[in-house]
Amino acid sequence: LHSNTSALIPMASSLIEWARAGGAKWSASLEVRSDGSRGRGVFATAPIQKGDLLLRLPMSMAVRPCGRLKDMVAKGSCSPLLALALTVVHELNVRSPQTSGYFADLASAPPPDIPALWEAEELEHIVGTNLLPSTKTPAEAIDASRTTFEEDVLPIMETVGEEYLPKAVRTQALFGAALAWVTSRALQGRLSFEQGAASLWPYLKADGPSTSLNGGNGMFLLPLFDLLNHSSESKDRCTTLARVDGDGKADGHAADALEMRAERSVAANEEILHSYGCHGAAELLRTYGFVETSPYTSTLLTVEQVVAAASVFLCSQGGKALKEQAVTDRLNALRKAGRLPIGDIFQLATTISASLLTLIQVLIYNKTELKAWVEHGSPQLAADTLISEIEVVGILLQVAEQARAAICRDSQDGCGAAGGKSVISASGRSAVAKTLRDEQQRVIREFKKAVIMLAMGQDGGDEEDEDDDEEEEEEGGDDDDDEEEEDEDENDEMQDAKRRKL
């Protein structure tokens, strides 16, 4: 996670000795060095057998909020995430870092280069990606961070008091750096980000979603463990973290230590890699400050974008754009049936989700088809249950094209093939952003391949719809409603005719 690693290797040795003095165990077959691609990491100096202990850390070494911050978390007036970040502000800027080998190590390096620390001109490079939607601007992102600091962070800093957080350290810059350390290194925690928003900071208020995982009692930092680097490829990983009791037995949340053992044999000079979680490229950059090819990468897509893509495709085929009231009725039916994703945001991945297929099919249903779908319990529609496959395929391809265009905003925007799975140094922010865009473009290309496979798998084309003459006429309503009904009927007839033509 470090961009300048040459000076950090001696600091790592001091950190290891400090941790050993505190009861930690560190295998004699491990050393910290830099290989030039992932930065500072942990490597095997000799062959390691499956099951061998790599490191073991007593929970007494965990860094958690204490004193007034701890009390505020218990009372629900401060979130665990914010409390831990303020603890880091105190340790790095108020209390001398040299009193702790761990914070001395952090103080010797710049914080992870997450986009929340970038300038507005650098954020231009990620507009259109999952991190900053094309509807938002870098200036809005900067303003959102400032507002969050002033409204959510600064009042807590003031409440904690002058002794723990003097006025001189109550700055957005110092807090942002501490937050970067916490988001990239905290264990037993969950970060929540508002999808589709301009803010690059996680949700910090106490009324937000729980930040604890698996029944734990809040997030914490743990020395040594965060020396290990991440790999998105399971074949590269060789260890995971486990809670154990005093005898080294797995003991869940009552454990008094955390340890890592080799889960396979490790060759000499091989880097010890594990997983930071199932993160796509955008999440890796937002949380840890680096990007690599990941099987979990996706591109975010709103319901509004899907509706727009459907209208563009239908118009391109001689039809009409979807009517606003018709769209509203169909989205209401989908929401009532629980067929739309949380926040109305889809994850466009290398396969086509049933929820996306369902949305598109229901959007282009005529009134008879919509009524029948609702009467049958509003089921989720898979590829083999669609009645308008050609139109669905066309709309899916239009969706992919609009997603591609949002990421690739001009000919200089790096829209070629993704550049392998190498990790890009955080020292070149434009290069990091390009790698993120390339990775999301790769996913879109794979998605388009899945759409083409769906089209090739068609068995003879679409079935014709039943006559719309059987539709029931709605009684009442004013002239505007009658006109809307006529427009939708006309659109249904045109779509039926187009399906027969296709």
Image (tube, rainbow, N blue to C red):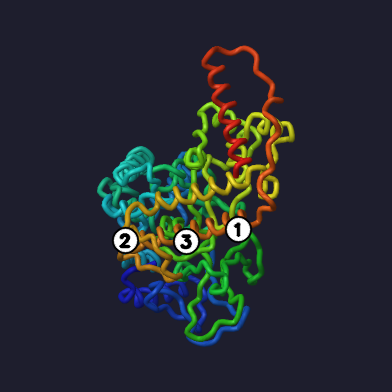
Query: Label 3: which residue?
Result: 442
Q: Secondary structure at mark 2?
A: helix
In primary-sequence order, the first of circles 3 and 1 is 3
Say the numbered circle drawn on residue 429. 2
The crowding category of the residue bearing disc 2, from other C-alpha atoms within 10 Å (few below 14, some 14 to 19, many at least 20), is many
Vertical order, 50 against 428 (above or below): below
For discs 3 and 1, the disc positioned in front in the rendered view: 1
Q: Callout 3: 10 Å neighbours few (<14), some, many (20+)?
A: many
> What's the amino acid at mark 2?
Arg
At x 28%, y 50%, the residue is 120
At horizontal 55% and vertical 51% (from top left) the residue drawn is 212
**Residue 45 at what x, y percent from top left?**
48, 85
The kind of residue on which mark 1 rests is Met
> Which sits earlier in the primary sequence, circle 3 or circle 2?
2
| Image depth: mark 2 or mark 1 in front | 1
Residue 386 in view (yes/no): yes
Which residue is depicted at the point 47% across and 75% down? 20
Tell whether label 2 touches label 3 (CB within 8 Å): no
Residue visible at 34% across and 55% down?
177
Q: Of the residues shown, which amino acid type is indicated by label 3?
A: Arg
Q: Which residue is mark 1?
A: 453
Question: In which quarter of the view is residue 37 placed?
Answer: bottom left
Residue 121 screen position, x and y as percent: 26, 52
